């Protein structure tokens, strides 16, 4: 609990500093409501993104369960999004998913569910790095001409992307090396988790489909950011620049420090947009952050519905 409150203090401390230093302008949020067409269109893109994310995880779970229904996973995704508004980082909301998924199909081992959720997150992060890395290389000269610091950012991004690909390729290690690797792994639970990872070696089509779906999902997120914020840019800002910078900013929100990435994400976007001579990056992210929070709060409906169904079933058994 001490660590949790320290993280909350850090996140909100950064947020408070951005406000007092004049880097965060709340008036943009009110102005975004004055153009409801753009706001609701951006929300629509986010809803599709959340839905695609749930199917991405569902494909991994279907590898081990023939009775698992993908549609039922959508409600779990929304509930996880709801809890992400109060829990620090995207990874902590994944713990919510594990419990609900096991309730849907108790034939799935908790070890495999844990692996599927972790691997789903790895695919999500890798595809985000892919978008940023590819566009960064394609528009390398243009971006570096704006600020030499962007060159280092692009190189770091490419390094992280290839690191994630190496991690994914771990699945396809030849079976002859499995026993040798397992001898080096401490703990039975970790060995069981590694063994579950290797079960996906014959699911290449599913993995490729999940990766492509993840790229589309993140692209919709970037498009949503542009849609809700394009009227607030401080001058011309090509969409291709956003495909390089926004993924890097979104990666910081996955760090388990503050709920929904508050403070941390604002500071990251302030820095990244400052590289391309836009001083209102924190304010732009704040509009997008409010949008995400409002859409995520729709998860209250599947949460209350599942709770009601559970209470009804418990009453009937009594």
Image (cartoon, helix red, strand yellow):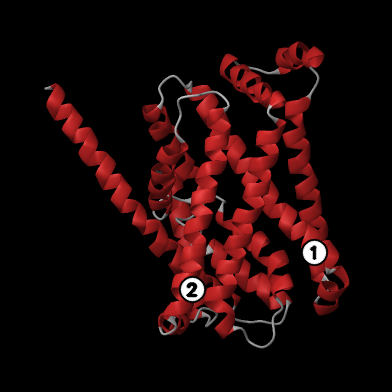
Neighbour tally class for label 1: few under 14, some 14-19, many 20 plus, Cα within 10 Å = many
- Image coordinates for residue 28, horizontal then vertical, percent: 47, 82
Helix, strand or loop at mark 1: helix
Say whether residue 99 is visible: yes
Instruction: Specify the quadrant of the image occupied by residue 72.
Output: top left
Residue at 57%, 35% (x, y): give it. 59
Sooner in the amino-acid sequence: mark 1 or mark 2:
1
Residue at 77%, 42% (x, y): give it. 163
Q: What residue does disc 1 label?
A: 136
Left or right placement of residue 38 versus residue 152 in this view: left
Instruction: Specify the quadrant of the image occupied by residue 290.
Output: bottom left
- Image coordinates for residue 282, horizontal then vertical, percent: 56, 74
Label disc, if present, on residue 243 of the rendered structure: none
Residue at 11%, 22% (x, y): give it. 318
- Image coordinates for residue 56, horizontal then vertical, percent: 57, 42
Left or right placement of residue 2 versus residue 276 in this view: left
Q: What residue does disc 2 label?
A: 287
Q: Quadrant of the N terminus?
A: top left
Neighbour tally class for label 2: few under 14, some 14-19, many 20 plus, Cα within 10 Å = many
Q: Is residue 212 above or below residue 100?
A: below
Q: Is residue 232 above or below residue 207?
A: below
Label 1, label 2: how many angstroms apart (C-alpha)? 25 Å
- Image coordinates for residue 117, horizontal then vertical, percent: 54, 36
Instruction: Specify the quadrant of the image occupied by residue 175.
Output: top right
Residues at circles 1 and 2 in contact by the CB criterion of under 8 Å: no
Helix, strand or loop at mark 2: helix
Residue lying farthest right? 141
Say whether residue 283 is visible: no
């Amino acid at each position: 609990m001490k660590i949790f409150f320290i993280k909350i203090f850090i996140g909100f401390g950064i947020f408070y500093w951005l406000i007092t230093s004049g880097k965060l302008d709340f008036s943009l949020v009110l102005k975004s409501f004055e153009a409801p067409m753009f706001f609701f269109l951006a929300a629509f893109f986010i809803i599709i993104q959340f839905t695609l994310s749930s199917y991405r995880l569902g494909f991994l779970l279907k590898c081990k369960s023939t009775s698992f229904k993908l549609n039922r996973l959508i409600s779990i995704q929304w509930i996880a999004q709801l809890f992400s508004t109060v829990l620090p980082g995207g990874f902590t909301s994944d713990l919510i998913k594990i419990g609900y998924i096991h309730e849907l199909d108790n034939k799935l081992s908790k070890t495999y569910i844990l692996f599927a959720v972790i691997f789903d997150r790895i695919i999500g992060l890798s595809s985000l790095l892919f978008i940023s890395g590819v566009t960064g290389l394609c528009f390398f000269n243009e971006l570096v001409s704006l600020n030499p610091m962007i060159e280092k950012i692009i190189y770091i991004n490419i390094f992280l992307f290839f690191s994630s690909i190496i991690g994914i390729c771990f699945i396809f290690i030849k079976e002859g090396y499995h026993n040798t690797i397992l001898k080096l792994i401490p703990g039975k639970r970790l060995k069981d988790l590694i063994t579950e990872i290797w079960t996906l070696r014959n699911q290449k089509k599913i993995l490729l489909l999940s990766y492509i779906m993840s790229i589309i999902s993140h692209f919709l997120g970037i498009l949503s950011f542009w849609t809700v914020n394009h009227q607030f840019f401080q001058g011309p800002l090509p969409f291709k620049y956003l495909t390089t910078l926004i993924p890097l900013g979104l990666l910081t929100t996955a760090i388990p420090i503050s709920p929904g990435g508050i403070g941390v994400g604002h500071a990251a976007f302030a820095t990244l947009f400052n590289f391309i001579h836009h001083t209102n990056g924190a304010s732009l992210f704040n509009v997008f952050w409010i949008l995400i929070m409002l859409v995520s709060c729709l998860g209250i409906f599947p949460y209350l519905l599942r709770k009601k169904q559970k209470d009804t079933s418990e009453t009937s058994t009594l």
